[in-house]
Amino acid sequence: MAPSPTQRILILGGGFAGMFAARELSRSLGKGAEIELINEVNFFTFQPLLPEVAAGSISVRDAVAPLRRLLPGVRVRQAQIHDIDTARKVVIIFQGLQRRYTEVPYDHLVLALGQVSDLSRVPGLAAHALTMKTLSDALTLRNHVIDKLEHADITALPEVKKELLTFTVIGGGFSGVETAGEMLELIHKSLVFYPNIDKREINVQVVEFADRLLGELPASLAAYATKQLQKRGARVLLNTGITEATGTAMVTTSGEVIGTRTIVATIGNAPSPLIRGLGLPNDRGRLRVDRRLRIEGHENIWSLGDAAQIPLVENARDRADFAPPTAQFAVREARTLARNLKAALHGLELAPFVYRSKGALASLGGHRGVAEVYGLRFAGLPAWLLWRAYYLGFLPGFATKVRVGMQWLLDSMVGRSTVQTGIRQGPGTRYLRYRAGDRVFEEGNRADGFYAVLEGAFELRYRNDDGTEALHHIAPGGHFGDRVLFGNGLRTGTVRALEDSLVLMIGAEDFRRLHEAMPPVREYFERRRAGPAQEESAA
């Protein structure tokens, strides 16, 4: 029997695993099911090219592609995923400017949420290190490096200049090595514009806890990568970890204090907080699935990509027995998932995931690379050209391939731009003005911050414990919005402006930090939460 057209397949995550799963399902099922993908941004990021975006060799727009263009026939919803109720088969999201609480039902659920960066194990690292996971990370790193060059060119303080020109990458895997190589390329090609900086003053460092770089590649290729980075002026520290980081220095496990104002962390991969809190079978945060990509004990919940621990053999035990979290494997997992989900809808037998890696490649910058493909090893210019050819072919869309190819060609002939691009984020604390009748937020919205009334007046409507409606007026000197920031984060009341008004709004995260750092502030709000419910904070 054909599957019912009402079958809803919901995919969470728009990375390699989620996007390719949606595409394969759409091709496989056609109009036989309703397919929807939910992601926090409306684009797919081609992560292997992020170091090139950070270095300015390709433009921002060519490392991303709109999900709606890539996925014809798939409904794409941009929203924040909050929770999953597996008993009721609904995903709870917050969508729109007001972060409205919404429930999205599903018949089959595909979890492809990937991993996040968790740098909390090293004191100061989360506060002072940059990461390389998103398009925003790449733009931030580019602007940061150029900012350090600008500052170093004018400072009269030798110690400050030395810190500014010391750039540190933590992690010697593919991401770390490629980021270091492209950072060297950006810096060296930009020095022509900074007459007060000598090339010999540049100090790029790669810090790796293992005894060699690129542990996924043969030792001979790792040795070549190390030699090439050193030849270009980089310092490679092996068997070295980080014990502390500040805004101007970091401390290694050997006790060395390195003055640096740039730390890029490509380590610390951790499961999504949502995945950790679901209560589904997992191993250190990665969802346990069978070889058919179904989560253990659940017939209608599937997972793939970085979020899943996928066995390649029966009774898998060793690390090598599980699929690595790479784009190469994610694309093949998506094909298996599409075939199996279609088979499940038709009541047919499911097939196990079977795939062997075809190899791996890494760009070192400076027209050099390393590669192992079908057992053959390449190094130097041939490997670098192979890396570019492979990812050029992998890029989605003919127009994107042409633009990236042209930019690579131009980059080999002209210098890099030192323009700082991107939009600076606004302050977490800001003034907001409302006209009479404007709604600030409504019951059920996701809490966005704390509001202190400076001018005008507001009306708060909420429900008492007995279900009756209550009404309260908030005048200058009053405030609202704090209570739920320490609860489940859902607004319990609706606030409207009674007249033209002005408030000081403190973002949720900034408010929590202020609450934690200032004992008088913390004590004040703890007394309020411990006492009888106050109307002005019920929202």
Image (spheres, rainbow, N blue to C red):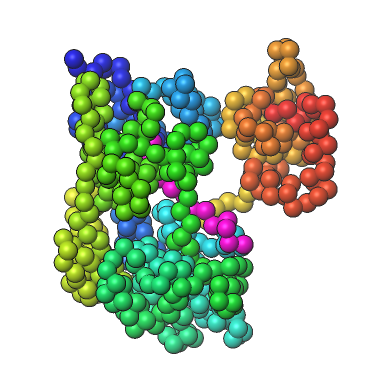
In the image, what residue occupies the spot 69% across and 49% down?
A: 513
The image shows residue 442 at horizontal and vertical percentages of: 62, 26
Residue 496 falls inside the magenta stretch? no
Q: Is 289 in front, or is 377?
A: 289
Q: Is residue 358 above or below residue 21?
A: below
User: What is the magenta range?
Assistant: 109-123
Say which residue appears at 27% left-offset and 44% top-offset. 313
The dominant secondary structure in magenta is loop
Provide residue 326's location: percent of width, then percent of height: 31, 52
Q: Is residue 292 shown left or right of residue 88?
A: left
The quadrant in which residue 161 appears is: bottom right
Q: Identify the image quadrant of the C terminus.
A: top right
Q: Is residue 420 above or below residue 399?
A: below
Q: Is the N terminus in the top left, top right, bottom left or bottom right quadrant?
A: top left
Looking at the picture, how far across and down is residue 241, in whole percent?
51, 69
Q: Quadrant of residue 291?
A: top left
Tell me if residue 346 can be seen: yes
| Residue 193 placement (x, y as % from top left) | 42, 79
